Amino acid sequence: MTKQTKFDSKQENNKEVTSMDQERYAETRKQSFYGDYLYDMVVPQDHFFRKLRDLIEWSRFTKKLIKLYKGEGVVGRPPFDPGMLLKIELVAYLYNLSERQVEEYLNDTLSAKYFVGLAVDQAAPEPSTLTVFRNRLIQRGKQKIFAEMLAEIVQIALEKGIKFGSIQIVDSVHSIANVNTAKDKKREDKGKGPRDPDAKWGVKHQRKVKTPEGKEIEQTDYFYGYKAQVSMNAETGLISSLDITPGGAYDGHHLCSLVDKDLEQSLPLKTYAGDRGYDDSNNHYYLVHKGLYSAIRLKENRIKKKDKNKEVWLKLIQTTEYQQGTKERYKIERKFGEAKQGHGLGRCRYIGKVKFAYQAYLTALILNLKRMVRLLTGVGFKTKGVVMS
């Protein structure tokens, strides 16, 4: 090979990917002898997975995610369509399955295989493929790509005609770290660091209880792990933004961030409701500054005689917006129950804050998708246990 030929070959290999280049993905349904015939026979028209597949333009996610791949699907070996891998992960979160379990589930369930885009006679990607996919999103996309995917779902909901209400609810949901705290204590005694250094102790519940003697005391329950600060529309039940924090973070410091993320999405918001954890003067003033009403439940000392701003707070709790907003707060607690009981958010799947962010955002995505299918088609997701080996 001449020097010129070597030079030309090197130039060819190093050329930049341009917008004119065509992405290539590993073949899936096109290889099937059966085509769509069998799927049309066995997957009912009103099946949840058929509705979910048809409702969303999944190529929008492919375009976002392929940018995280070296060569962007143009150079090198054709990768699996990242939009398809995202759908496989969503199936895993829908049924709270591990990556190995979701492989087995897809191979055994034609409706799920139809949803993700696999051929009838094609095996699901191996668990290692999903692990590489997840790590790529975490390492190259970090939390930004998660937030972009959630915002994309919200925009699709708006485009489809879902009407968002004016009341937004904020609250935090906790997840227990995927560690054994007793073993962590032994590690600490040996001079070693914790298995999950990002996780922190936080308050789970505070409530007043009576002792056997009849004395009223305050009881505090703690947890070790993380929190997801969540903003949800009261009318639609759709989650619009998240903030991820260690378990010990103060909720009140994250309201402004959630508000900013929501306003960037052009949602028709008027009032923010939250529990006493968000009752910080800066939060009330920030909402006023943004032209919004506060329905953050006030702490008891706000309206006591010693508070110099007592009259301001008394006027606040008498407003229609405050009274309407506080009545809506229960809806987000119901959503958290769904996330924990149905989709495994009560315990971290992985180790580390960024990986918990992945879990929290994927859970929010599947919660939103379930709700959108219900709102737009009337088809609900029928919860049923999936028993896997």
Image: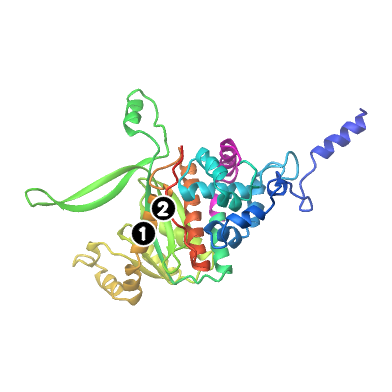
Q: Position of residue 235 (x, y in %)?
A: 43, 69
Q: Position of residue 227 (x, y in %)?
A: 39, 48
Q: Which residue is depicted at the point 25% across and 65% down?
A: 302
Looking at the figure, which quarter contains the N terminus? top right
Residue 101 vs 235, above or below: the answer is above
24, 97: nearer the viewer: 97
In reply to whether residue 121 is colored magenta, the answer given is no
189, 283: nearer the viewer: 189
Q: Position of residue 152 (x, y in %)?
A: 57, 59
Q: Is residue 221 left or right of residue 160?
A: left
Residue that label 2 marks: 339
Q: Is residue 215 left or right of residue 319?
A: left
Residue at the extreme top: 190
Q: Residues within 10 Å of mark 1 (few under 14, many from 20)?
A: few
Residue at the extreme left: 213
In reply to whether residue 135 is colored magenta, the answer given is yes
Judged by its main secondary structure, the magenta piece is: helix
Which residue type does callout 1 highlight?
Arg
State the SS at label 2. helix
| Residue bounds of the magenta highlight | 124-148
Q: Is residue 77 left or right of residue 355?
A: right
What is the number of the mark on residue 334?
A: 1
Which residue type does callout 2 highlight?
Ala
Query: In this orientation, does residue 145 appear?
Result: no
Asked whether the residues under the numbered discs 2 and 1 touch, taking CB atoms below 8 Å apart as contact, a structural biologist would say no
